[in-house]
Image: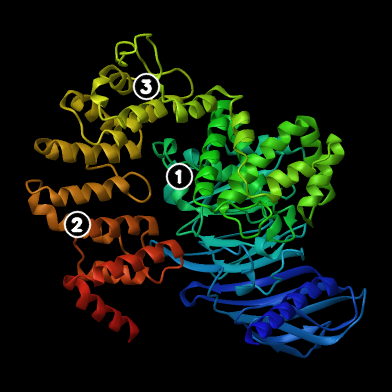
Amino acid sequence: MRSFLVLFFTFLCLFAKAQQTEIVDFKTINSRLVIIPEQSKVSGKLVSSFKILKDTDSIYLDAIDMKFKNVVLDNKTVFFENDLKKIVIKSKFKKNKIYKLSFDYIVYPKKAMYFVQNEKDWQVWTQDQGKYTSHWLPSIDDMNDKIEFDLSVISYTDEKVIANGKIRKRDIADNVSIWHYNMQKPMSSYLVALAIGKYDKKVITSKSGIPLELYYYPKDSLKVEPTYRYTKQLFDFLEHEIGVPYPWQNYKQIPVKDFLYSGMENTSCTIFSDDFMIDDTSFVDKNYVNVNAHELAHQWFGDLVTETSGTHHWLQEGFATYYALLAERDIFGEDYYYNQLFEYYQELKAQDSAGQSTALLNPKSSSTTFYKKGAWALHVLRKKVGDKAFKDAVKSYLNTYAYKNVETTNFITEVEKTSGQDLNTFVKDWLSSSVVLEQQIEASLKRNETASFLLTMQTDPYLSFRTDQDENYIPSSLTMSLPEGFYTIKTAVLQELLNKPDYPTYDDLITEAFQSGQIQLRQTLALGLREIPLKFQKNYESLLNDSSYVTIEAALYNLWANFPRKRNLYLDQTKSIYGFNNYNIRILWLALAIATPNFEQEKTESFYNELVSYSDPNQPFSRRQSAFDTMSSLGLFNQQALTNLLEATKHHNWRFKSFAKQVVEMLSENEKYKSLISNLQDNQKQ
């Protein structure tokens, strides 16, 4: 009986939500916001216009844990109900009439808006994906109701406010600014966004005249070029390839601290993790190009046309993944494109082997399915119907459903129209089935030499290829060399070689890789040669000079482990290198310096204190996690480090929070830390 009641009330809730979009169409939401980071508080005044589609006695806006006053409908005070999930307006609403609603509200958001300390300054940013905008802005937690949102935000004059749309004006008075942003077109509520902080910006212009605003922290001026490298090329390519003009007034990109994901495609206003604010050396190992292209593609696929429900999520993520890959192909070439498709295929096969494959039209599918299988489906479909039919269909699809919501049938119908083909089999095989179509995928990959070679290596390793008819033939460095072609071919062969127990017999191949000058090949050696033969010591030491933080980190540790007598020399050589934003090299360096008995012993305590400082709440969570991980390896936690660790268990980033909880659980099993952790937890509760 209880199960029946739960299902019954769930049905009623879903039915009520479905009915809301049939009864009322919210046209505009204008909101004036005062945000107080120190109190995690938002106070706002909201003005909305809406059209009644059917006579009704109530309408609502989703509003989580909010308090309201001065609720007015068409200039008259109106009765309302507030269940802390929505504000319900009671009145005799008449069909086809347009109403104006206004009210004041206060909320302390528990989700969606985050108040983060970035060094000494506060930063505020939003992440609403799904249905969370209503935690800070009364709105509609249903992507099928598209609304024009205009935000006005009050901030201190030394801070910048960035939001959807175009800055209409900025009022300044008494050390306070009011930023007025205007959107001209409607969007789903989950795409509303704002960010507040101390930023500078660089503005470039697309070929079509769209302003591209590239934000950065003032201290990161030298990171602007490597971070935003290829941005204009990506934008111009996508606009041309998609065939539909960019649909918004401008495009802004804002890095923020401790973001939940890599990036989020808010309409005209992408917010991304500041871990992607990189220097030139980082570019080779960790750059923003793919995320940049992916979030930009969403401005069409997701923002301009939006799925009706999770069943059609691939229309957003599969398309964004595919078009990002096309944009990268325009920069890095055809071999890169097919290599990425090959990698996607490996992920899909691994998922399938784990018994976790799902259909693209399954709303509970994994990211691997929505993103990677979605991209593959579009690649195969394009080959099937031809470039012209595919591009014409995409163009018609976007123009027909602009600023509306879509289902998979809408897209497939457009492709059938332009191609004249029946796509029932394609839909069945690629969209409705959970099967990974290995034969079709591999046939497609074999059209490219790089991908074909990588496929062949899975069954016939390169180092076992026969180059002599003698049945006793043993491959020799005198008769083999690294193959030509895209660098992934060479790295695949090198990885195979390093996995062989007799790899030292391939001296010339290893020497060739060391002397190649190719960062990716040398990085493979850094990561793969953990036990370094003495004959390769000098070559291996040269890896410390490579322009790759991944290479330097691996090389430093392996050299330190293999050649104890030269540890001080290696530490001296790398003492000024910090690495990525998580300080991967500096934190490793501190651990090795602490663990090296005869290295600057008088500074051991200061080395440890520096390591602990990187676990502080003001530090980026990626740096904090690296510091905690290293302290765990060393078995060294002082009271300050433990205090920082316990604070991390309450962090808004769920991955980091989960990591911190696991470390606390592990340390609590150690008598050395058990009582100290318990006392600190008790103090936090008081």
Answer yes or no: do the residues labelled 3 and 2 have beta carbons within 8 Å? Answer: no
Front residue of 386 and 124:
386
Quarter of the image where one finds residue 525: top left
The 10 Å Cα crowd at callout 3, few under 14, some 14 to 19, many 20 or more, is many
Q: Could you tell me how far apart the alpha carbons at marks 3 and 2 are, in whole angstroms?
A: 40 Å
Q: Which residue is mark 1?
A: 221
454 sits to left or right of 600: right
On the rendered image, what quadrant is the N terminus found in? bottom right
Front residue of 416 and 620:
416
Q: Could you tell me how far apart the alpha carbons at marks 3 and 1 are, in whole angstroms?
A: 47 Å
Mark 1 falls on what kind of element?
A: helix
Q: Position of residue 80 (x, y in %)?
A: 74, 88
**What amino acid does circle 1 point to?**
Ser
- Which is more N-terminal, label 1 or label 3? 1
Residue at image location 29% in from the left, 11% down from the top: 478
Q: Is residue 389 above or below residue 105?
A: above
The 10 Å Cα crowd at callout 1, few under 14, some 14 to 19, many 20 or more, is some
Q: Position of residue 173 (x, y in %)?
A: 59, 69
Q: Is residue 214 above or below residue 180?
A: above
Q: Position of residue 113 (x, y in %)?
A: 55, 68
- Which is more N-terminal, label 1 or label 2? 1
Q: Which residue is mark 2?
A: 634
Q: Which residue is mark 3?
A: 463
Residue at image location 91% in from the left, 75% down from the top: 97
Q: Is residue 510 above or below residue 468?
A: below
